[in-house]
Amino acid sequence: MADLLVFVDESDGVYGLIAIGESLSGRLSSEISWVKYPRRLGRKKKRGYFRAFKRRFRKVRKLLAYARVFYEIERLEKFLAQIMPRIKTLYIDDRLYSRLRSRSFEFPQVEVVLESKAGKTRLILLTDSLANYARRKPRDVKELEK
């Protein structure tokens, strides 16, 4: 049964993926009010935001089905194919979606919502922040994955 909401974002060749059970999405959204859009933060605020990100992310990780970071698009494709039967809705970066489609990656029976159509929801921002954090601090990523 398809019950996962999956969010995928790219940050300079680093792919962040977060998956959550549909029934927990509202609870998670209320617990991540601290999430911001990193590109809109000033330099000092951005530094503080990413310094606190690891600690804050660990607190909400328990609500997630998956939290993964990929440094190669092939590994992302393989993981998406693995969990595809459980995905109800896939929220994905527009450019990344185009790249996956051009590589003949299919999304059968999955509702695909492009980031440009969904807007900057808290869950999309959390995925964006995960990818940005992984790009900045690759050695700390394993501690955040689930």
Image (tube, rainbow, N blue to C red):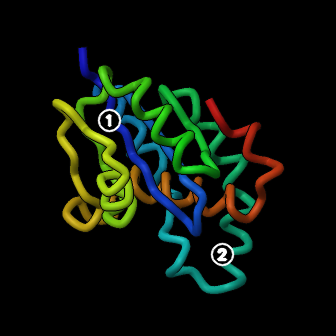
Q: Which image quadrant for residue 60?
A: top right
The amino acid pointed to by label 1 is Leu
Which residue is at a point 55% across and 65% down the rendered structure image? 11
Could you tell me residue 10's position as x and y percent? 50, 60
The foreground one among 3 and 46 is 3
Q: Please give the name of the residue rendered at 66% of the width and 66% of the height, measured from the top-left corner.
A: 49
Image quadrant assignment for residue 3? top left
In the picture, the disc for residue 60 is none
Q: Residues within 10 Å of mark 1 (few under 14, many from 20)?
A: many
Q: Which residue is mark 1?
A: 5
Q: Earlier in the sequence, mark 1 or mark 2?
A: 1
- Is residue 88 placed above or below 95 in the rendered structure? above
Residue sitting at 36 percent across and 66 percent down? 95
Q: Residues within 10 Å of mark 2 (few under 14, many from 20)?
A: some
Residue 46: give its label. 2
Query: Considering only vertical position in the picture, is 102 above or below 146?
Result: below
SS of the residue at dot 1?
strand
Instruction: Say which quadrant the N terminus sits in.
Output: top left
Rendering coords of residue 37 (x, y %): 48, 70
Q: How many marks?
A: 2
Q: Looking at the image, which residue sits at the far right? A: 139
How far apart, in angstroms, are the residues tagged by discs 1 and 2?
A: 27 Å
Residue 77 location (% of width, % of height): 46, 40
The amino acid at mark 2 is Lys
Percent of width and height locating residue 131: 58, 57
Q: Are marks 1 and 2 in contact (CB under 8 Å)?
A: no
Work out which residue is located at the far bottom of the displayed protein and give it. 42
Q: Residue at x 56, y 40 (%)?
A: 75
Q: Comparing marks 1 and 2, which lies closer to the viewer?
A: 1
Helix, strand or loop status at disc 2: helix
